[in-house]
Amino acid sequence: MAELLGCPQQYRAIIHWRGGARPFTSPDVSALTAVKWNRTLNDTAEGTITIAKGTAGADCCGLLGQIEPYAHELTLYRDTELVWQGPVIRTRETRATFVVEAHDVTEWLARTVNTTVLRYLSTNTADPMHMGPVQEIAHTIIRLNLQAGLFASQPDWPEMLPYIVRLDDPVKASFEKDGSDNASVWIVPILQIINDELVPRGLEYTTVGRSLLLSRPMTTADPAQARLTLNDIAGDVQIVRDGPTGASIVWVTNQVGDEISGTEFGVSGVISPEYGRLDTLIKTSAEGLTAYDLWQIARASYNGRYPVPTSLTIPEGSTLAPTAPVSMRQLVPGQRIDVAATGMCNDLNQPYRLADVEVEWGASGEQVGVGLVPIGEPYTGDPP
């Protein structure tokens, strides 16, 4: 029997010391007037609590005033289930309320500058920086930066490494970002490397609780976490069949302007009997990309474009019903969720990927909103 989303009896918030283990303080449940948190794909999620100072009492208020951004973390419990955790980035106090704002654990990667050489070209698996799935490369970059503890009080100061979970792509990736001497370090935040260089190559990341998930895009070959119908959605929906975002072949080139000598391209897709030529061209001005690099980007960009995608949008104000046959721990961005939308002109019965989860809790109870995007067929196209 499928698990149901259900209605929580309460939310609890605990402020922990950095690392999420040792508690610092926790406002009484009755003082917690509002909770907002989300999970999102390839971005940093946010969590916020609002506390009524009058209900919290003087002792609790004194401790709240000692909360230090980045020294403390916010943890949210939905009944007894830990659903969100990450470093406090800001507190705001008025005469009546105390607000704590936090980001998920990817914030630590946004505030840690890379100090390692990025040269993942070796075929020797004994080399820490060898070619491999893009998820493994991301994991290695994070590990080498956090484990070394350079300029930090201790190795793995944010306590992230034990909570990294991977679902590797079967295709090996190569990645290089260095100077002409092959020994220069790219001085940018780790999260920028992930977003700018590895996500275009097929990496997907999200957080659940304290866990950082390094994954690949789900396809129709992957099993669904749940199957929903329109009866599981409270409110309106919008079905969009969007031709401009579709493509049967994706091209990526480093040709910029009129100069074409010495340039490369990558391509992924299928020869479509339905659409004829339905191409999408992506241009990149990044330097040093090989044909294999461009193919990786084309391969990742193909997902969800063929056939022409039909997206299901749940507008603001519409939420999942408590009777929806999906548990909160199954609502993980990137995972496959099937939807059957009968009774509409578009008689949908197709798979989607979960893009984001938005949760609010307050006096009127809990509201859970989700965003769904088209899922793609398994990748096609051989590397150059």
Image (cartoon, rainbow, N blue to C red):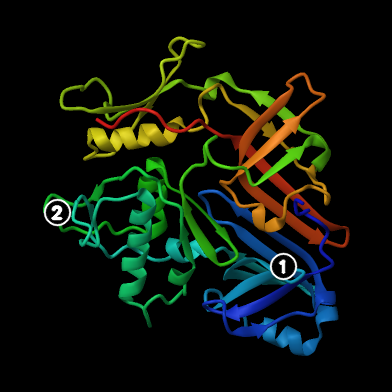
Q: At label 1, which amino acid type do we have?
A: Ile
Q: For mark 1, give the secondary structure.
A: strand
Residue 140 appears anywhere in the view: yes
| Residue at 68% in and 59% down | 37
Quarter of the image where one finds residue 136: bottom left
Give how far across and how far down residue 69 sits, in percent.
Answer: 56, 74
Q: Secondary structure at mark 2?
A: loop
Please name whichever residue, 52 or 380, is drawn nearer the observer in this view of the structure.
380
Residue at the extreme bottom: 59
Residues under numbered marks 2 and 1 in contact, where contact means CB atoms less than 8 Å apart: no
Residue under pointer 2:
182
Looking at the rendering, which quadrant does residue 226 occupy? top right
Give the residue number, with chain letter if any, for mark 1.
49
236 sits left or right of 184 in the view: right
Extreme residue toward the front, this view: 1
Number of the front mark, 2 or 1: 2
Q: Residue at x 51, y 27 (%)?
A: 305
Q: Count the marks: how many?
A: 2
Q: Amino acid at mark 2?
A: Asn
Residue at position x 77%, y 18% in the image = 345
Q: Is residue 234 visible?
A: no
Q: Residue at x 52, y 37 (%)?
A: 221
Q: Which quadrant: the C terminus?
A: top left
Q: Is residue 362 left or right of residue 278?
A: right
Residue 339 locus on image (x, y percent): 70, 35
